[in-house]
Amino acid sequence: MAGKLMKAVQYFGYGGGAAALKHVEVPVPTPGKDELLLKLEATSLNAVDWKIQKGKIRPFLPRKFPYIPAMDVAGEVVEVGAEVKTFKAGDKVVATLSFSYGGGLAEFAVAKERLTVSRPPEVSAADAAGLPIAGITALQALTQSAGIKLDRSGQQVSILVTAASSGVGHYAVQLAKLGNTHVTATCGARNLDFVKHLGADEVLDYKTPDGAALKSPSGRKYDFVIHCATGIPWSTFEPNLSPNGKVFDLTPSSSGLLTFVLKKVTFSKKQLLPVFATLNAESLDDLVKLVKEGKLKTVIDSRHSLSKAEDAWAKCVEGHATGKIIVEP
């Protein structure tokens, strides 16, 4: 592929939103020794993508401009680096790309072998592309942080999922219901039926008084909160938690981190704990298997062609997508 050009979308500095995305032709990247060159079939957007553009993770990300955003991709292996053992040209895969260099909004991208897994024919490219960041975040919060077993073993626990129709939230509801759980979920009024359909036992409209107060309709106290929303203070969570209740904050803010520190200092049994996912092939492979078995599904909010990537970007920044936003070359 050396010397060939591909279509891609880049931005050249911080800020500017969808209007700052530029359609360009750039050389197809060359895989390093532990990397694969993928012909992309689908890419999904995550909140972290626009946060990087906005400069919320500067000076760490992006590593340099111009930058091709988006990390979660599915496609076909075209070429492999000298040390790649697991994959060969023609394999269908799903991967998460390096945060530093991105690359998802393009016709081709380079992925690390250790962050790539096989995609069986039962799992479509778009369904697979939705999984990495959002799915792994939900999976690890439930299984590692909350200790939920996805085979329904263990004692029943009560879980609250906030922003349950979001990318992370819609996976969290489905995964939680694979365990021995009672799930209460919050979302906007238009998504109440959708979240119920995902398996939630009770659903709250976050704009009603009870929804804003996070009160369980059946009067339960939550053992764990999978917190995918923003802007809910600790004082709202605290009265709804069981004596050892924990809030796992998947979008930690500075005020949330301060609460975390204060709760640590006061040895409170109720805690707010920031959760940062560890992106790895093992978790991604677990998710792909669950999709293949029909136990988990990616709900697609909207599909956009690469030539209209700015529409997908604007929808992502807006923050009201139901499920995942997909871009296809």
Image: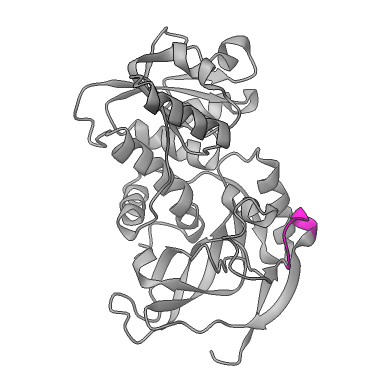
Pick whichever, 76 or 116, lies toward us. 116
Pick whichever, 213 or 193, lies toward us. 213
Quarter holding the C terminus is bottom right
Q: In the image as oriented, which residue stretches furthest toward the front?
A: 265
Q: In the image as oriented, which residue stretches furthest toward the top?
A: 219
| Above or below for 128 versus 35 | above
Pick whichever, 254 or 53, lies toward us. 254
The percent position of residue 27, horizontal first and vertical second, equals 63, 84
At a point 70% along the width and 60% down the height, the residue shown is 309
Please indicate, yes or no, whether residue 116 appears anywhere in the rendered image.
no
State yes or no: residue 14 in magenta: yes
The percent position of residue 107, horizontal first and vertical second, equals 60, 74
| 133 relative to 305 in the view: left or right | left
Please indicate, yes or no, whether residue 278 appears anywhere in the rendered image.
yes
Where residue 173 sits, quadrant-wise, is: top left
| 201 relative to 191 in the view: left or right | left
At a point 74% along the width and 63% down the height, the residue shown is 21
Pick whichever, 279 or 116, lies toward us. 279
At a point 26% along the width and 21% down the height, the residue shown is 156
At a point 72% along the width and 59% down the height, the residue shown is 14
The percent position of residue 282, horizontal first and vertical second, equals 30, 56
User: What is the basis of the colouring in this image?
Assistant: one colour
| Above or below for 262 versus 283 | above
- Highlighted magenta segment, given as a residue range: 12-19
Of helix, strand and loop, which mostly describes the magenta segment?
Answer: loop
Number of numbered callouts drawn = 0
| Above or below for 74 versus 235 | below
Q: In the image as oriented, which residue stretches furthest toward the bottom?
A: 3
The percent position of residue 167, horizontal first and vertical second, equals 53, 42
State yes or no: residue 150 in magenta: no
Where residue 288 sits, quadrant-wise, is: bottom left
